[in-house]
Image: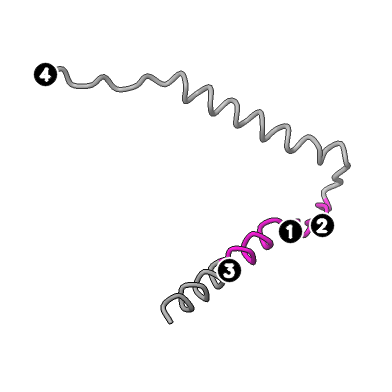
Amino acid sequence: MRAIFSVVGLLLVVAIVALLARKQLTPAVALPAASGGGTPAAAAAAPQQQVQQFQQAVQGAMQAPRPEPDAK
């Protein structure tokens, strides 16, 4: 009886994980284009700008000095 409950529980967990994985792997619905005169070239520039902002943030974090540990 204990083995049956273990197998049923395991199958339930596998089914839940499979459903969540399938939900995560399905492509998101594409948002409609902005009406602000967006062209494909302008739409492609947005990810490049995000990458550049991320790189700048990482560089800023790398340049920030770390606090010195207390010497005892």
Tags 1 and 2 in contact by the CB under 8 Å rule?
no
Image depth: mark 3 or mark 2 in front: 3
Mark with earlier residue (4, 1): 1
CA gap between label 4 and label 3 equals: 52 Å
Rendered residue at 81%/52% (across/down):
34
Q: Image quadrant of residue 45?
A: top right
Tags 4 and 1 in contact by the CB under 8 Å rule?
no
Image height of 49 relative to 16, above or below: above
CA gap between label 3 and label 1 equals: 16 Å
Rendered residue at 58%/66% (across/down):
14
Image depth: mark 4 or mark 3 in front: 3
Rendered residue at 46%/73% (across/down):
6
CA gap between label 3 and label 2 equals: 32 Å
What type is the residue that disc 4 sits on? Lys
Q: Position of residue 65 (x, y in %)?
A: 37, 19
Q: Is residue 21 magenta?
A: yes
CA gap between label 4 and label 2 equals: 60 Å
CA gap between label 1 and label 2 equals: 18 Å
In the image, 39: left or right of 45? right
Image height of 49 relative to 21, above or below: above
Mark with earlier residue (4, 2): 2
Mark with earlier residue (3, 2): 3
Residue linked to disc 4: 72
What type is the residue that disc 2 sits on? Pro
Mark with earlier residue (4, 3): 3
Magenta extent: 14-35
Q: Which mark is residue 32?
A: 2
Q: Which is nearer the eye, 44 or 37? A: 44
Q: Image quadrant of residue 47?
A: top right
What type is the residue that disc 1 sits on? Thr
Residue linked to disc 1: 26
